[in-house]
Image (cartoon, rainbow, N blue to C red):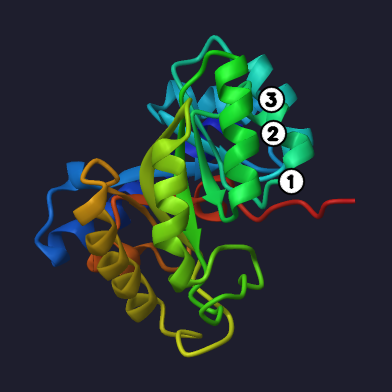
Amino acid sequence: MKDRNDELAANLAQVEERIAAACAAAGRAREEVTLIVVTKTYPASDVRILSELGVRHVAENRDQDAAPKAAECSDLPLAWHFVGQLQTNKVRSVVGYADLVQSVDRSRLVTALSKEAVRQEREVGCLIQVALDAGESARGERGGVALGGIEELAELVAKAPGLRMAGLMTVAPLTGEYAGRQQAAFERLMDLSTDLRRAHPAANMVSAGMSADLEEAVAAGATHVRVGTAVLGVRPRLG
């Protein structure tokens, strides 16, 4: 376990250095960017080590992995983010542990999240996942709402009991005009965030950037970066 502790501590320190350097290059304070460690496919023991190393935000993308892990780590001072495509039949479980759902992309999901948050007497922060590879009305390849659907969905979240409109999230697209242009994609997300905050001033969270492109996300103005591989190592293959 000590070897794993040392490995995670070294990786975390390197990521912290990258974020700090990116903030300095962008003229931003380090405190403006929150690191979310994506712990999917890794055990609860790693989450426990990360917590001891000072990590306060962790993310998961599959409820069947996340729910038991969150339960096992319920004594830790962590905020849990759900970042995967979420089916409505998993909402009851996810609302039980997730402080934020970053992948809100359709009205039916908003309705289900609201109903369950009220039932469990919880407040769940919601980020609208923006698909920069979608047309005006389509959904993206990896989920997300098209640009034309953001305003309507944000209004729905803002009015839904038990939910808090927290901001926007995106994944750098693999196709379309932003393919291979991560910083341009993240800058577009920042523009959309500016538009959103005119109607919803408190929705100031912008989640963008992962292990390979966190520098571009910080340069664009992201408030949160989601880093997995750079902290935890190359993921084992899922069966």
Kindly state the secondary structure of the residue where label 2 is placed.
helix
Q: Amino acid at mark 1?
A: Gln
Instruction: Report the residue that reaches farthest toward the right.
Output: 239
Q: Residue at x 60, y 34 (%)?
A: 113
Query: Quick one: label 1, few (<14), some, or many (20+) residues within 10 Å?
Result: few
Using residue 84 as the reference point, say whether residue 10 is left or right of it.
left
The residue pinned by badge 3 equals 69
In the picture shown, does residue 169 fall above or below 40? Answer: below
Identify the residue at horizontal 68%, vertical 38% (top origin).
Answer: 42
Q: Are marks 1 and 2 in contact (CB under 8 Å)?
A: yes
**Disc 3 crowd, CA 10 A, few/some/many (<14, 14-19, 20+):** many
Mark 3 to mark 2 CA distance (whole Å): 16 Å
Badge 2 density bin: few <14, some 14–19, many ≥20, Cα 10 Å:
many
Q: Are marks 3 and 2 in contact (CB under 8 Å)?
A: no
Q: Foreground mark, 3 or 1?
A: 1
Q: Amino acid at mark 2?
A: Val
Q: Is residue 191 left or right of residue 92?
A: left
Element type where label 1 sits in the image: loop
Give the residue at x 46% y 46%. 156
Counting residues from the start of the chain, the first of labels 3 and 1 encountered is 3
- Residue furthest out toward the top: 75
**In x, y percent, where is residue 204?**
26, 47
Please give the residue where the numbered disc 2 appears in the rendered image.
Answer: 91
Q: Is residue 66 left or right of residue 3?
A: right
* Image coordinates for residue 186, horizontal then vertical, percent: 35, 70
